[in-house]
Image: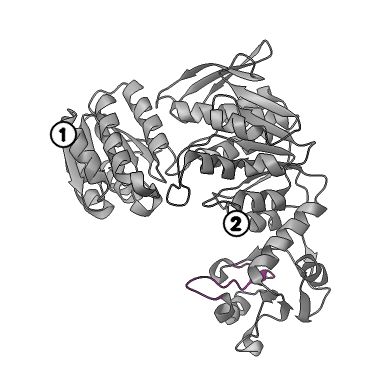
Amino acid sequence: MPTLRLAQLAEGMGGSLERGDPETRVASFGIDTRRLKPGSAFFALKGSHTDGHAFLADAARAGAAAAVIERDAEDPGGAPPALIRVDSVERSLIRCGTWLRRSARSVKWIVVTGSNGKTTTKELIATGLSPRRRVHRTPGNLNNHLGVPLTLLAMPDDTEVAVIEIGTSGPGEIATLTEITDPDVGLVTNIRAVHMETFHSIDEVAAAKGELFALMRDESVAAVNLDDVNVRVQAARHGGPRVTFGQQPGADLRIESNENRFVPGATLVVTHGEHPIRVQLQMGGAHAALNAAAALAAVLAAGEDPDLAARAMEGVEAGTGRGRLHRLERGMLLVDDSYNSSPPALASVLDTLKASESRGRRVLVMGDMLELGPMKAALHREAGRRAGAAGVNLLVAVGPLARESAETARRGGVDEVHHFTDSEACAASIAELVGDGDVIVVKGSRAMRMERVVQALTERFGGGA
């Protein structure tokens, strides 16, 4: 991690060192006193429910060397030994991350956003580059205005490539995060109708994601998904070089085949010029293969070897809740896709479920899809219809919106349908509903806590990922 003198830190965030030795060095940064490391700097953020200024004594007990504050501490004697005064702790964190990015000129910066698949794509890029480069990446999905600067501040001094994920829930956020990260390579995986309680149309979603392309430097390289018309339109906002991918004949990385299955994992074949590149993924689904194609395009845009990257990507396993496979007792296969959901993501998973062989039944455990705005009921009815068309034999719907899916699925010919009010109730009963040889997919929006269902199944029937 970078070791910064307090004098540098104060200058970088536009603050003043109120007390403490300006030569004291800090090597880590945090906003949660429960996770602070000794010798760190604590940003006393003021949120909607808590105020970090009330936890300065906790920061001191955790060994923090300094705290960044915007008002007087209630007990200055109990605060960390050094205090940096700023006009806004939140803005100072953003300034500090931006300042660090501008000082890391030797690092290649790859920035990833998109409606679906950005976290998996980020992991594929980082792993693909790791055999030859020292890579720093966004941990998990810390992709907002706080997580991104904290990721930058945690970057080791010897980093050669930084792979940063950025996200949005409203207009202007991608623009802010692009200004912080100043990408050398920018990738938008895809653009879908998500966050529709904030955005009122797919065009608004596209414009927000396209802020990345619009604010990249002219010499930066855009990685462009030619199969997504919204991405193509937004990519026109960048006048610099590009690397394209997709099934279109003129793509720099042309997708030749994509085997859509859960087991043993999706297989992707792309050609670069006349040279074929085959990737056998440990992750299932056509959506995983498309993420790999996007990742290879970003690698190529960064001037790195896509063949070498492809071999490394074959070792990447799906993250918890992001399509991880569990082999259960009695020949059952569980697909843990519980981290989040949206209509396009659910449709892709159903396509894979339909294409997958099963000794037993095809089972979908579906939680509510949230943030869909006024179309939420209609989109849940469409999900029930899609489940029937995909050959789902057992639909287990969870939540008030998913009741619409259940009722549509009953009318659409799904053999067996159950509905539960929440994931806790579902978890208590799910083991009695599944049977020998079933392929079970669990999916739902984050707030639905569908991981409870996954935990209930793995505890009852064992089985490792």
Q: Nearer the viewer, residue 1 or 208?
A: 208
Q: Residue at label 1?
A: 416
Residue visible at 35% across and 48% down? 374
Q: What residue range appears in magenta?
A: 36-51
Answer few, some or many: residues within 10 Å of disc 1's Cα (few below 14, many 20 plus, some between 14 and 19). some
The answer to which image quadrant residue 250 occupies is top right
Q: Which residue is drawn at 62% across and 25% down?
A: 310
Q: Is residue 16 left or right of residue 456?
A: right
Residue identifier under label 2: 147
Q: Quadrant of residue 129?
A: top right
Under tag 1, what secondary structure?
strand
Figure quadrant of the C terminus: top left
Our reading of the magenta stretch's main secondary structure is: loop
Is residue 324 visible in the rendered image? The answer is no
Residue at the location (55% across, 24% down)?
227
What is the three-letter code of the residue carrying label 1? Glu
Between residues 387 and 213, which one lies in front from this camera angle?
Answer: 213
Q: Which mark is on residue 104?
A: none
As for residue 40 lying within the magenta part, the answer is yes
| Residue 135 x/y as whole percent | 70, 42
Amino acid, disc 2: Gly
Residue 167, horizontal then vertical, whole percent: 56, 48
Q: Earlier in the sequence, mark 1 or mark 2?
A: 2
